[in-house]
Amino acid sequence: MTTTLQQRIQRALDACAHFPQLFTAENDALKTLAQDYSQKLARWQHHEQTLNIGIMGQVKAGKSTFLNTLLFDGRPILPEAATPKTANLTRIGYGQTHSLQVEYYSEQEWQQIAEQARQPSDSDSHKVACELLAMSADSNISLTEHWQKVANLKDQTEVINARDISELQGLLNQFTGNDGRYTALVKSTVLTLPDEALKGFEVVDTPGMNDPVQSRSQKTRDYMANCDVVFFLSRCSQFLDDADIRLLGEQLPGKGVKRLVLVAGQYDSVILDDGYDRASLAETEENIHKRLQRIAQQKSEQLVAFQRENGNEARAVILEYLAQPVFASTFAWGFAHWPTDKWSSSMHHIHGELQAMAQECWPDMFSQQDWGRIANVETLRGAWQQARHDRLPILTQQRESFTRESEVQFESLLARLTGRITSRITTLETQDLQSLRQQQSQCQQRLEGIAAELRSIIGDAIFAARKQTGQISSQLAEDISRHRHLTAHTGIRQESYSYEVSDSSWYNPFSWGRTRTAYGTTSVSYQYFNPQDAVEQLRQYSRTCASQIRQHFNTLIEPGALKKQLRQSLVKHLNTDSDKYDASVFRSALESAIYGLKLPELTLNVDESRMMFPFQGEVKTPEDKKRLQQILDSALGSMFDDLAQQLSSGSQAIFTQLETLKNGLQDKLSNSLNAEVSEIEAGLQRKETEIIGYRNLLNQLA
């Protein structure tokens, strides 16, 4: 059986456990490597077992019913959002208990909702903000007490456990239902169930609207970016309308998603609309499929062309999947699989109308097979499994990558450890107490010169880093110009127009010359800014710059490179020809002291709470566009000031730590030398037993 890297690391740790007080630097490094690799492996294994699924679509597209059918066999676990204001972001996954994790708005975010409600506007976001405030007032919740509770919660999140799924369903209605007491104050929810069928899946049910709070909208984008497959629900009766196209353009992630499944939902309703004009169910379905597939093909080609023209190849590839819609009906699934007493009133109504139409217009009534085919749930489940299959090669590459990196670290540690053990065996075989103390004295005399050169190396690194810190700040300022550009989006609106047409008849002379006013509509394109783009630009600037600062600064004071330079200098000093001095006696111990140095690294914290803009929906007027640009510029400047301050204070803290390390370096080397001498002296007292133990340890490590 092949020994895994995790097993090899553990065996090395088990072998070293017989010498707990010796080779502590290497032993500690092994423990750190074991913990780090174990954490990476655990994350990978969790990632491997989890397929991340995003559900997108407009409010009333049937997302909740769709998920209830696929995940809960139709049980109404997820309450349906009757209006946009109740459509919260919900994640669903496996857990050991039934639980609901509720993330509330912060008081600052609620104040922004209130400000949005005060701004006169006819936008959807203004209406939603007003409705949220009204819902909160109707619930009779003391906001003062509520904000006090939220302030004491970790990440504004409350975890509520339930005994069973029925109790959990009641909780959901309170926090996410249309009439829930706390719904207005809830930002997002996480639902966990100990249901084996959910193992391997995490579902993100998105609000499907432009959120009145940008931080929540950004949260949706963040979760969607981690999705492997996205199911986009579009009602057959309004298939891929303008609102759908806007959602696909604004919320669909450009990276990460491997497959987009277009679900032509509520298929039963369009059969009812179309069936009276057809001679059979087969003819009705054939006509619907041709018509809607033609729409899907046209919309897909338009969206793909637009994305490619704008350089978004990844998104263009995903949008090509729109040309292959999957027709589905959750009601039909219920007709085929659930007893009638489990049907909702809407299901009873639709079923009755469909049966009446079949009896009146077609030669045959609906069969169980017809309902199953119309439901088409198995095709959707197959899409989930196919996405899981397609992602395994990528995940395997990820595991191989971090395993190779850990293997290199392990082999390096193993070489250091075996080198120290071999050196210890050689010393015990060739030295006695008198010669050992002579070697110690000789080495101690050289330590001052060694430490002086090592201090010089650290001093040079500090000087270079101080000099270039200002250059990093200059680069940050230059990066602002690359992130202040807002891309104009193209929208389409319908405008009415009137024109005069002749209303005369040749047979009626009195009507000659008479006209009437006729009316029509035309599609007009317009340009607008999306305020979420401004949020994204600010996020990209902050994260890119923070990454560049860390990378650039830690290259100047890179722990691995600095330790290597210190070690090379140490070896150069120790390699001195002398009849009285054997450098190999203490070389491995002093090298170990260098490896064990704790060198500081720069850390930065990016405050994303400022990434909010007082705009919602489409920014169309020149005045609003100019104001949005000004606010973005101001936010970028504020972010620059914050990062520059963190760079200044963080680098100064590092310089102080390095100075302390530099000044204490000689003591560090001296202590390591003395500890090595003490261990060897103790070993010389039981020389043969000690050598046997070390050789056994080498064999175990090999």
Image: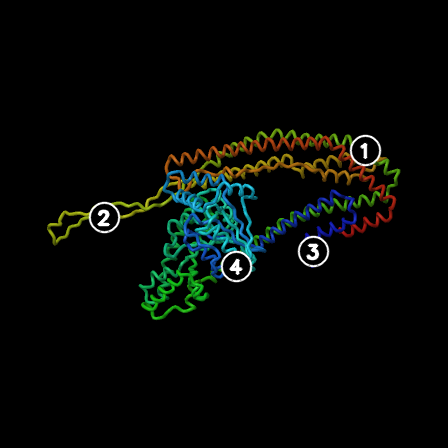
Q: Mark 1 vs mark 3: which is more N-terminal?
A: 3
The secondary structure type at the circle numbered 1 is: helix
The secondary structure type at the circle numbered 3 is: loop
Q: Amino acid at mark 2?
A: Ala
Q: Are marks 3 and 2 in contact (CB under 8 Å)?
A: no
Q: Position of residue 648 (x, y in %)?
A: 59, 31
Q: Mark 3 vs mark 2: which is more N-terminal?
A: 3
How far apart are the two marked residues, 4 and 3, measured between alpha carbons?
31 Å
Q: Mark 1 vs mark 2: which is more N-terminal?
A: 1
How far apart are the two marked residues, 1 and 2, measured between alpha carbons?
104 Å
Crowd band around label 2 with a 10 angstrom C-alpha radius: few (<14), some (14–19), many (20+): few
Q: Amino acid at mark 1?
A: Gln
Q: Are marks 1 and 4 in contact (CB under 8 Å)?
A: no
Q: Mark 4 vs mark 3: which is more N-terminal?
A: 3
Q: Nearer the viewer, residue 341 or 313?
A: 341
Q: Nearer the viewer, mark 1 or mark 2?
A: 2
Q: Amino acid at mark 4?
A: Gln
| Residue linked to disc 4 | 385
Q: Quadrant of residue 200?
A: bottom right
Q: Mark 1 vs mark 4: which is more N-terminal?
A: 4
| Residue linked to disc 3 | 3
